[in-house]
Image (tube, grey):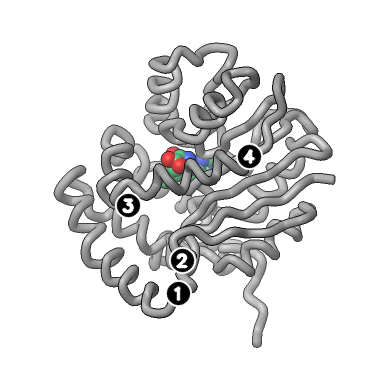
Amino acid sequence: MTEQPLTEQISTEQTHFGFETVAADEKAGKVMEVFSSVAYKYDIMNDVMSGGMHRLWKRSFIAKAVLPKGGRALDVAAGSGDIAIGLLNKVNRQASVVLTDLNGPMLHEGARRTLDEGLLPGIADCIQSDGTKLPFADNSFDLVTIAFGIRNFVDVPAGLAEFYRVLKPGGQFMCLEFSKPVLPMLDVIYDTYSFNVIPAMGEMITGDRDSYQYLVESIRRFPDQKRFEKWIKQAGFSLVRHDNMTGGVVAMHRGYKV
Ligand code: SAM
């Protein structure tokens, strides 16, 4: 079997944007357009598309996170802030979380929600940044999380290398992402639902079918559980493992900087 290259890029000039092949320097702009377009309806669409399941996936993810009292976490691609808010509530606000996202309108939703929860500033801070070029010193965080964000990166290994760099020795990295169903027939049901229902729902609720078409295509393009685990190890992480949720529709990957 031929090993697939350790990058989402097809060549140095080309990459995937869903099922489309685009110039590598074009992808980030296209991803920005998608999230700028869906930001104001992002939370409601998550509930509708997943039938509320995303809340359970995130709850299980937060339950496994290790954030010490007085510790500092970084939530990359934080969007509207579900993970950051969940982490802070888990530790009774006795820690701090930095929310970063490349997209201004999405981060604005995160800032609005953390402000509503009384977490801004100080306990939670919002910083706009690309996950592959984080504006933080080496060894700055006890925990780095990313949920449903990494498959949008132009260069996933570059992102993983950044997460490793900013994590303190002993720190935990956690990633929640759509993955490959592992139960018989689930892939067929899931594909039918994804390609026939989600773009139509996107059109109905947000008036933007194309963004949700990209969403389902980007999920199919993302590496499966084992391959992604390998990428995480290759970034330097130890004790890397994954847990499937909903039969592998979603997977939680964990690793440590030792
Ligand atoms: N983490 C949130 C959640 O679980 O609800 C938001 C997930 S949303 C599907 C994906 C997020 O990834 C968007 O907010 C998008 O702007 C962000 N994103 C995409 N590419 C990024 C990059 N290169 N660096 C940082 N954030 C990025």
Q: Are marks 2 and 1 in contact (CB under 8 Å)?
A: yes
Q: Would you place residue 4 above or below residue 157 in this image?
A: below
Q: Give the percent coordinates (x, y) of residue 187.
A: 39, 74
Q: Give the percent coordinates (x, y) of residue 159.
A: 64, 47
Q: Earlier in the sequence, mark 3 or mark 4?
A: 3
Q: Are marks 2 and 3 in contact (CB under 8 Å)?
A: no
Within the image, what quadrant is residue 145 found in? top right
Residue labelled with disc 2? 247
Q: Is residue 190 left or right of residue 218?
A: left
Residue at 57% x, 63% y is 9
Within the image, what quadrant is residue 124 found in? top right
Q: Are marks 1 and 3 in contact (CB under 8 Å)?
A: no
Q: Label 4: few (<14), some or many (≥20) within 10 Å?
A: some
Which amino acid is tagged 1? Answer: Leu
Residue at 65% x, 35% y is 134
Residue at 44% x, 29% y is 107
Q: Are marks 4 and 2 in contact (CB under 8 Å)?
A: no
Q: CA distance from mark 1 to mark 3?
A: 18 Å
Q: Are marks 1 and 4 in contact (CB under 8 Å)?
A: no
Q: CA distance from mark 3 to mark 4?
A: 22 Å
Residue labelled with disc 4? 65
Residue labelled with disc 1? 183
Residue labelled with disc 3? 50
Q: Label 2: few (<14), some or many (≥20) within 10 Å?
A: some
Q: CA distance from mark 2 to mark 3?
A: 14 Å
Of circles 2 and 3, the one toward us is: 2
Q: Mark 4 near ligand 1 (CB under 8 Å)?
A: no
Residue at 57% x, 38% y is 76
Which amino acid is tagged 2? Answer: Gly
